[in-house]
Amino acid sequence: MNNLALNTPLRVLYLSQDPAQIRRQLAGETLTREQVGPLRDDVSTDEITPVHILSHYDDTLGDFAHTGLRCEGDTPIGRQALRQAGFAVLVAGRRYGKGSSREHSPTAEKLAGVQLVIAESFERIYRQNADNIGLFTSTDFGLLERIARGEPITLADLVQGREDLAASILSAGGLLRWGQRFLKHVDSAAGAASHTDTPPPKAAAPCGSEPLLANAGSQTLFEKILSRHRLAAPHTPAQPQPGMGLFVRADWRFIHEYYTGMADTLLRGALGEHVRLQRPEQIVVFEDHTSYVEESPAHVRGGLIANMHAMGRAQRDFAARHGLTLHRTLTDAEVLLGDGSNVAGISHAMVAEHYALPGQVVVGTDSHTPHSGALGCVAFGVGTTDMANAFVTGAVRVTLPECVRVELQGQLHAGVTAKDLMLHLLATPFIREGQGVGKVFEFCGDGIARLNTDERATLTNMCAELGGLTGIVAPDAETRRFLKERRGVDFQIEDWMHSDDGARYAHQMTVELDTLCPMVARPGDPGQGLALSDLHERVRIDIAYGGSCTAGKREDFEHYHAVLAWGLAHGLKVPEGVQVFLQYGTTAVRDYCKAKGYDKTFTALGVRILQPSCGACANCGPGSSTDPAQVTVSAINRNFPGRSGPGQVWLASPPTVMASALAGELISFEALQRRVSAA
């Protein structure tokens, strides 16, 4: 493996924390790492490719690379700037590529001429997406000295230290080429043995009883599930260790409109017009990002409405062509006309409500796919190329992670929720330092038994923010209750569906739930959490938003309603100038709230109720800010720069969001109650 990969000279762009240093480089100056000062950490995919331009998946995408990058409140990289400057190498700090699973980000960089990204560490999905399209990534800063000296960089240099599968995929030029060479028959051969062609209301039968890890006796539940779904494939070890790549067979694969057209284009380009999908009955397609696109300021401003509609039509065509299950979007107009009967909602929330079961493997083109891990399955997000490859081979790539045990003890106080727990975990040094990247978070202990499935889903969903591959909760009586009451499934938990005593964990965390209090996270990153009682400044708000996959569940709406009903009973009103939005996660949640009469309370306080879908969370609907001066308190899962509009977004729990809406400033429900009582 000595063939030339990158020929010098190569222009290097250091992504500095100082926007002036970035502009100097864009203007033609060559700076050293010392000259640019501290590098930007936590560069998110929302900044590399802002969500409103994701309707582009052709060469135009390269014009927008890093147009959302925020440094000291400034956005120094304009449209086409990266491409026109001719940089081949980008350099940044820790946790590069945080956030969304969007493969548009490395694709935009590659289309802009970038061949190599060097960073102190990478988020799992971003790096895997980069591998899959042949964009090199490295944590070896020594390469910069060699580039400065004009030395050629070989393929061997670039894959040094990478596990065998990643190196092999990069050497082949990307995953689709590699998959067609090595994976054409791997799933069909295993399928007959695993008996999961049509998933019954129980877990797939095991493909084998051998442990996943070499020399492993006791196993975690995650390892057991992967063992039962593992596929034998070239360049994967017989007995893998953490950090090694392998392939598994997914019981469910799902995709939504931001990725389907791109996947279809990839498949047609690589395999021609007559592509055959493996197990199409286990592929589900969702429209969940376009319900309110006509009201999305970013899309309207960018002239992208027609693109978004074309993207939706491309998805419907793909689903029809291959006979796939499609959950289409639901608009306000349809509901007003009485045509609101279709089952709709946010993809990963819908998967938990209708498809996923304990012991299964679920993959989706969304970083919050771990939502379904609350049911005791392995659920994780992948990029577009990974999903396209999985469509035609049935095989899903995963790098074997280490597991982190999070033991929850005791019980949360009234008014404190799973969202507060997650904001607490995100602020711990272990997570802030990036130690959770790529890992599996297993939630256990007597405290987990006291949380219902909706609250557990908040924990597993936000493992994406922890940087993890996924989160998982072993199925128990609560899981059986949820499946029976919500889905009519009589599920029997099998004896193996738990982690063994003595299972190996890379790290263990213990949280005393009764020590937690309402939390918020400062604008810019979910990891900037603090107890609301420690916030000594007064933060006035313009927008309060409750919804998204993390906070659009039935339990979340119980909290929204409890706070607003209390406010109504005490004569409170939403202050003038404050906008309040509530968006259901799924139609089942909407129908539950209507049956309970919650919508009447919401309407009485002037709350705008939105149909089930993604919305302000992904900057694609009402509730997004329109001005940098606006301040939002939101129950969504992430608040990266530009994520929900140009304003400042504070993250909080459902009760805190609604209490703040009534007060016009950040406040917990308990503090609001004390304030009203004292008045």
Image (cartoon, helix red, strand yellow):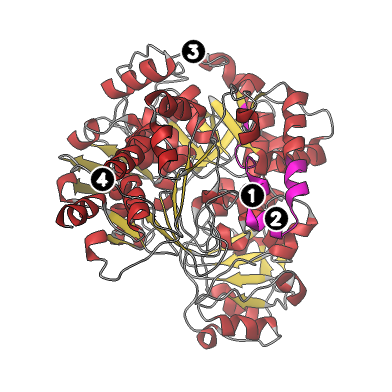
Number of marks: 4
Q: Residue 22 bears which disc, if any?
A: none
Q: Residue 570 bears which disc, if any?
A: 4
Residue at image coords 53%, 82%: 33
Residue picked out by circle 1: 295
Tell me if label 2 and label 1 are in contact, CB under 8 Å.
yes
Left or right of 297, for residue 476: left
Left or right of 129, for residue 218: left
The amino acid pointed to by label 1 is: Glu
Q: How many angstroms separate mark 3 from mark 2 (CA)? A: 44 Å
Foreground tag (1 vs 3): 1
Of mark 2 and mark 4, the one earlier in the sequence is: 2
Tell me if label 4 and label 1 are in contact, CB under 8 Å.
no
Q: Residues within 10 Å of mark 4 (few under 14, many from 20)?
A: few
Give the answer, above or below, for where 556 lies relative to 528: above
Residue picked out by circle 3: 200
Residue at image coords 29%, 57%: 667
The amino acid pointed to by label 2 is: Val
The amino acid pointed to by label 3 is: Pro
The amino acid pointed to by label 4 is: His
Q: Does 292 lie within the magenta span?
A: yes
Element type where label 1 sits in the image: helix
Q: Does 57 lie within the magenta span?
A: no
Of mark 3 and mark 4, the one earlier in the sequence is: 3
Q: What range is drawn magenta here?
A: 284-311
Quarter of image, res 546: top left
Element type where label 4 sits in the image: loop
Residue at image coords 32%, 19%: 481
Residue picked out by circle 2: 300
